[in-house]
Image: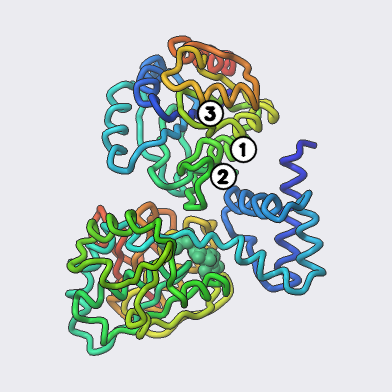
Amino acid sequence: MMEACVVGASTGGVSALRSLLRGLDKGFRPSVIIVQHTATEGFNVLVDLLRDSCVLPVSEAQSREPIQPGHVYLAPPRYHLLVERQQRFALSVDERVCHVRPAADVLFQSAAEVWRDRLAAVVLTGANDDGARGAALVRSLGGTLIVQDPQEAEAPEMPAAALRLAGADHVLPLNRIAPMLLKLAARANA
Amino acid sequence: MHLTDRQDIEVALFTEALRKRHGYDFGQYAPASFKRRVLGLVTALHLRSVSELTERVIHDEGFIHTVIERLSVPVSELFREPQTFVALRERVLPDLASYPHLNIWQAGCAHGEEAYSMAILLREAGMYERCQIYATDFSDAALAKAQEGIYPAREMPLYLENYRKAGGTARLQDYCTEKYDLLKMHDELRANITFANHNLVSDGVFGEMHLILCRNVLIYFTDPLQDRVLGLFRDSLVRGGYLCIGIKESLSFSGVASDFHLLSRELPVFRRTATAAP
Ligand SMILES: C[S@@+](CC[C@H](N)C(=O)[O-])C[C@H]1O[C@@H](n2cnc3c(N)ncnc32)[C@H](O)[C@@H]1O
């Protein structure tokens, strides 16, 4: 069953994330964990914007915090966010990965090792190649990879890079990603 | 078995080898980020597997220095997390100002950025002459760099912004010399700083400290190791002494939380409670 969904987004990500989260309903049980590349200054605004777009609780992921179902978490600015075995968060200030911190690669790889085939990963719009290597590990450990169709992404590089390296289980336009997640989550509960 | 599970076995054996062969115990580091760093080391050294790393750790005498240097993540900035320096300037230093002599322990000093920032802060508060800063790390390579106090000049814009946000009262350029693409901290800042090797995993308490800074180190530790280290800090602090951790760190998941109280909800600055068991 799908226990968690990790999401990576960069350029153009804020509006993409808002539209994605708007599509999730109160009954959505998996934890949603997001890396969005943002400047430190913009982070609190981002949290507020996402809160306004989502019926699920939204908060910044805290070091050591146990990960709750049906909750949306955002990686704090300037820290990598990792998932540890006991389904708790860990932060690190290790070197940037793909020139960014937080990096979706770091989140995806650690989440893949913990949740394996109970994980879905989503790669959204972005102008770099962060997330591709993490996405490959997600798939190789049995998780489901959803990539936003690069043709309609505001910045196509990030989804395109993921497709090149990892392929995908589903390549979808933005407005069909949330319905797909709902479907995957529902299949899980059956 | 998936590669990632085989790597977990290898990392466990590598950890065991480091401990048995060299006395370094990484067994209580947060596993996900530790594994990342070990795999990063394998890539950086162009090795094929963690097992190859383990073999070299066992048989190659000087290799351990490279390993510790690379596992240690000495990533820092001058005046990193500037709001913490504002809090130190406004809330902590005025309270400590009445002591004739102050001991400050900065644990996990990386390349010294935090120690020099502290020296600058203390100078601007007119207290540096009375202070002794002990800046410690378990990486000799990091300590050697810290002693030099030389940073890439391309970091200057970030440092300047941090310094401004930290409420610096002079010009950062007054404390360092920029030459070619390097930035060298002035010698007088180093006058009251002692750089020393101390391993938070295995070494003991450190004097009668009035202020301890340990930022962005505890995030790498599991709960039991974090508790050990916080216990060490508690026992090294004078009554009413201050502990400062990273802005994304907290004592919420710690067993010794009751020995400290939070100064203000927004800032990671704590005070050792008077009743804390020594
Ligand atoms: C990410 S840096 C933090 C630097 C600085 N405090 C800051 O916040 O910018 C972490 C430092 O902790 C040191 N460290 C890690 N484990 C340690 C241990 N067991 N004992 C002492 N230092 C340790 C590393 O060598 C590294 O220099």
Q: Which mark is residue A114?
A: 1
The residue positioned 67% from the left and 50% from the top of the image is B39
Number of other residues with Cα within 10 Å of mark 2, as a class: few under 14, some 14 to 19, many 20 or more: many
Give me the residue at 34% from left, 40% from top: A39
Q: Which residue is mark 2?
A: A84
CA gap, disc 2 to disc 3? 13 Å
Number of other residues with Cα within 10 Å of mark 3, as a class: few under 14, some 14 to 19, many 20 or more:
many
User: In this orientation, which residue lies closer to the viewer: B159 or A4?
Assistant: B159
On residue A160, which mark appears? Answer: none
Q: Residue at x 48, y 68 (%)?
A: B229
Same subunit, tags 2 and 3: yes
Q: Amino acid at mark 1?
A: Val
Q: Secondary structure at mark 1?
A: helix
Callout 1 touching callout 2 (CB < 8 Å):
yes
Query: To which chain does the residue with label 2 belong?
Result: A
Identify which amino acid the numbered label 2 is placed on: Glu
- Where residue B109 sits: x, y (%)? 45, 69
Of the 4 image quadrants, the one containing the C terminus of chain B is: bottom left
Q: Nearer the viewer, residue B233 or A97?
A: A97
Decide if residue B272 is in sight here: no
**Upstream in the sequence, badge 1 or badge 2?**
2
- Amino acid at pointer 3: Ala
- Marked residue chain, label 1: A
Gap between marks 1 and 2, in whole Å? 7 Å
Instruction: Confirm or reject: label 2 Cβ below 8 Å from ligand 1.
Output: no
To which residue does mark 3 refer?
Answer: A4
**In the image, residue B201 lies at what x, y percent?**
57, 70
